[in-house]
Amino acid sequence: MSQSNGGEKRQGRPTMTDVARIAGVSQSSVSLVLNQMTGARISPETRQRVLEAARQVNYQLPGIRGEISSDAEGRTIAYIVDEISTSPHPVVSFDGARDFAFEQDFLVAAYVTRSNPQLEAATIEAIKRDKSIVGVIYSSIFTRRVTVPQALQGLPTILLNCYGEARRHISILPGEVAGGFTATAHLTGLGHRRIGFINGEPWMDASIDRLKGYRQALATADIAFDETLVRSGDWLPLTGYHHARDLLSTDNPPTAIFCGNDLMALGALEAANEMGIKVPVELSVMGYDDQELARYTHPRLSTLVLPNYEMGQRATEMLIDMVAHHKQFRPMTVKIDGPLVVRETTASPRPR
């Protein structure tokens, strides 16, 4: 984990991401297995791999818990989010918050506001009247600056995947600069010197920071930044496809392409396949997010984990420390870094 703006360091402990990486499955599958969910179509072999991976890293299985108190007063956390159904990322963050809270004998209740000011105001008023709610996680679907509602004053509140006025709040954010650096450094470490970058929408915080990380990794490897190798996309496969074809059709094409998310990387793989370019022999493709689809591309996609689950865990941990253990935190920004996942789409460049 990295931190800024007065963030704190803490010793890392085994996470669900570690278990997922070792078992070779998604964080959602790990959560289903470790929470002993019934009805999920997960094979016995997969369940066994998850349990063995959890034991290997000494991950505390969520099934080993005390029972939730029958008196729910003062044991519920309100999770306010602007949207949860249009992207897997806020769902995974909520999973992390819910699982950690349950281990600590708390419950998490989700409130989706759809970015509607009237609905948000009514939601907060209802939360303030609910005696069982001890604090709030205020979250957004994508990383951005928010105006924290005045009505939340007096309620312990942690911002998740968003940030407000400087030095006023505790914010949990993904380490996007570090992520862009790690993904690009993986490619430079393999020997690539011409690395294309298909980024997301340029106004978004994630795109800005991943580009910073990309440029920093190039500079660290003594590679000059070439703006002709950078494209702005919209996070969707078709954009990745068109930009990859464009990059690979130039007189001096890149030997590697780093895509700002796995969906655009999927499009880049399709473009390379149509053009008869073999991955990773003739072209390396790097994704970002580690969505479920990254395990099923051909070849399987190398990527970097967007640590949504750990972010949800950390926000809940800090909130419980505040309300149950009376720990005092100064305003800070805590940035959570995601690990690199090397699969089959990246390799050293073939001599030209």
Image (cartoon, rainbow, N blue to C red):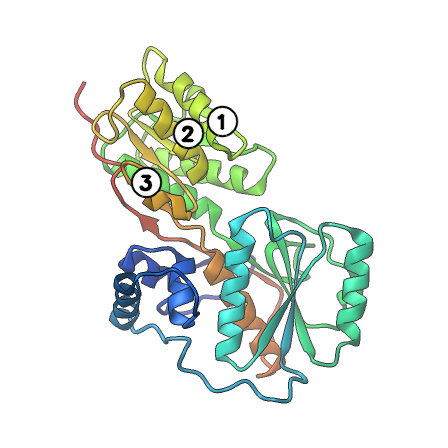
Which residue corresponds to mark 1?
A: 239
Q: Where is residue 151 in the image (x, y as percent from the top left)?
A: 80, 65
Residue located 16% across and 22% down the image: 351
Mark 3 packing: few (<14 Cα in 10 Å), some, or many (20+)?
Answer: many
- For residue 348, what is the image quadrant? top left
Between the C-alphas of marks 3 and 1, the distance is 17 Å
What is the three-letter code of the residue carrying label 1? Thr
Q: Is residue 214 above or below residue 231?
A: below
Ranked by sequence position, the earlier of labels 3 and 2 is 2
Residue 267 bears which disc, if any? 2
State which quarter of the image contains the C terminus: top left
Q: Nearer the viewer, residue 103 or 168?
A: 103
- For residue 50, what is the image quadrant? bottom left
Asked if residue 7 can be seen in this view, the reply is no
Circle 2/circle 1 CB separation < 8 Å: yes
What is the three-letter code of the residue carrying label 3? Leu
